[in-house]
Image (spheres, rainbow, N blue to C red):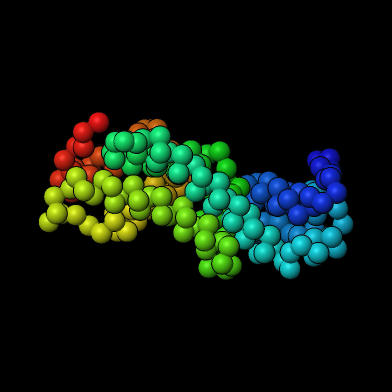
Amino acid sequence: MPKRGYHHGNLRQALIDAALELIEQRGPTGFTLSEAAKRAGVTPAAVYRHFEGREDLIAEAAHQGYGIFADLMEFAYESGQPSALKAFEATGRAYLAFARKHPGHYIAMFESGISVNRTPELAHAANRANAVLERAAADLSQHIPEDKRPPASMFSAHIWAMSHGVVELFARNSPGRASPFPADDLLESGIGIYLRGLGLVRPDE
């Protein structure tokens, strides 16, 4: 692969972009800093002016990923307004769309073993994304009978787990995990069953 090169002042981003490509192709532990440097078109020594090690580089890729993810979730949430149900369903679809469009970021965020608490910036970005789904869950919870209504944080965690499971098993071409149903349909029907089990009274459109 030819060297990508970079403009003066944006070496840091060139290294992150190189790492994202390598993460997507080989996984978060399948490359070295030297390989990321080579792909970015710089010497290995240049990497250490910006990152102490591979985990720092992956953590920054995750940080940027959570920022993109939160923006997509915010847009999805707003696009469904004023219907609480449409806003909630849109955030689930946004999760799948993000995993498809940004696989390197997704892997750095959820499969690298990097803690979201590694840096305050990473924690803030992750919390912002989670807060969107929790807000959508809180809105929709108002249409669930009070005696069946879980806390919004639990509600959103259930849907996050369901979304993540669909991505991992059926939306990322995992060997031996082919599904006869599209990932979007699996998630939408799963959410529907979950909501009916809670006794959701369909909100007015």
In this rendering, the answer to whether 113 lies above or below 186 is below
Q: Residue at x 85, y 63 (%)?
A: 45
Count the numbered circles shown. Answer: 0
* 147 relative to 2 in the view: left or right: left
* 138 relative to 3 in the view: left or right: left
Q: Residue at x 57, y 43 (%)?
A: 102
Image coordinates of residue 54 in percent, x first then y, are 70, 63
Q: Residue at x 63, y 54 (%)?
A: 61
Image coordinates of residue 46 in percent, x first then y, are 84, 60
Q: Is residue 13 visible?
A: yes
Q: Nearer the viewer, residue 135 or 35?
A: 135
Q: Residue at x 36, y 35 (%)?
A: 80
* 191 relative to 15 in the view: left or right: left
User: Where, quadrant-wise, is the C terminus in this rendering?
Assistant: top left
Residue projecting furthest to the front: 82
Q: Nearer the viewer, residue 180 or 159?
A: 159
Image coordinates of residue 107 in percent, x first then y, are 56, 52
Image coordinates of residue 28 in percent, x first then y, are 62, 56
User: Where, quadrant-wise, is the N terminus in this rendering?
Assistant: top right
Q: Is residue 188 visible?
A: no
